[in-house]
Image (tube, rainbow, N blue to C red):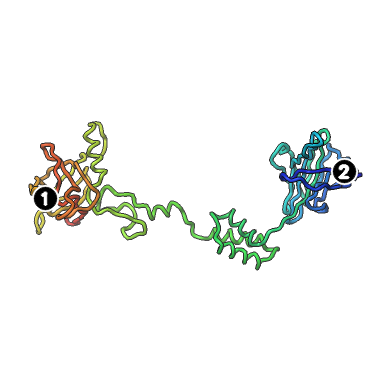
Amino acid sequence: MFIHQNFILAGLLSALVEIPVVASINPVIDCGIYELDTIHPLDTGIDYTTPLSLKDSQAGELCTLSRIIPPPSSSGNTMMVNVGRSYDGHSWERVAGLDDKLTYDCSNGKCQVTLPPPKDSQYYAITRYKHSISLKNEAARFLDRVSWGPTINEINALTSQLEIAGTANKIKSFETYIFDQMELPPSLHLSYFRRRAASRSYQMTKAAKIGPEPCASGSHWRKFAFTQNDLFLAEERNKTRFNTYASPGYTVDIVTYSTSSGTKYGLFYAGSFRTIIDEPFQTLDGTVLDMNGTSYQICKVDEIEGSARDYPDRLGLFLNDGRCVLIKGGNPSIKIDHELY
């Protein structure tokens, strides 16, 4: 007896195939004996109360067990619903879909499954596929799964190893690659960013430094004493007395030091050391500000290092009368005298 069917596979109509159907009760199904790329209906005399035995696929092949649903009319298309698969010599396994509750019990190269009886004119069928790829494609697929993306050189290197190893030791080559990768020093994201991140330190201290070394790759350091953050905090301090930021307050506090080379002035902000200057603050008209233990609030700051000749607009201080005056020399450079501080 022969059956005639047209099947839709992956959206394409397959050729008309004629498959002989031999009546038997639950034979052991060996997918490897069937013709490639052809749908083979199971025997019509299957006992659906008894498990069906299926041999595992052969290396490099795919076998599928499907439920075939004929079209409702002569003009319709036949549907093929996969209910199990075995590939590359692996045991049979269930697949996602309407029949994903099936259980495959596998041992010694074959599996058993109890199929629910097909409805109406439906039936089960076996299909066998075979596909081979080059060693280079195989290496590329492997590296694509185990890395962040291989380079051509990495693909070529692994391809050469697979060619030397041969088919029998191909899996061993993949294992060796994984073990070699595990032996490499890890390129940790955290350590990468720690070496390169140099968040701005708003405080200077001789006891410790924040961030990488000055000459380290990716490090960046400032040369000016005061920042826009200092100005922002000073303004916020004035907005509310409930502000609970650092004490003693957001003002430039001046400490006078007497040295053998003359008087020097230590500048502190919110209690934190910023720099030492050799001359007292002067306004643009030459007025010398009181530097004897006094404090000033910042009213203007530019984050660029000033000098005695240029950039006078880069630091402004409030006087007691409320005027914001610009300081000659601008934002002072950072200088630490370890004999004084």
Which residue sits at x=91%, y=43%? 23
Which residue sits at x=17%, y=57%? 339
Can residue 280 be seen? yes
147 left or right of 109 in image: left
Q: Quadrant of the N terminus?
A: top right
Q: Secondary structure at mark 2?
A: strand
The numbered disc on residue 280 is 1
Q: Could you tell me residue 151's position as x and y percent? A: 54, 60
Q: Secondary structure at mark 1?
A: loop
Q: Is residue 218 above or below residue 42?
A: below
Which sits in the foreground, 52 or 34? Answer: 34
* CA distance separating discs 1 and 2: 107 Å
First along the sequence among labels 1 and 2: 2
Picture mark count: 2
Label 2 crowding class (10 Å Cα cut-off): few <14, some 14-19, many 20+? few
Residue kind at label 1, given as amino acid type: Pro
Residue furthest right in the image: 1
Can residue 108 be seen? no
Residue 94, picture quadrant = top right
240 left or right of 12 in image: left
The numbered disc on residue 3 is 2
Residue kind at label 2, given as amino acid type: Ile
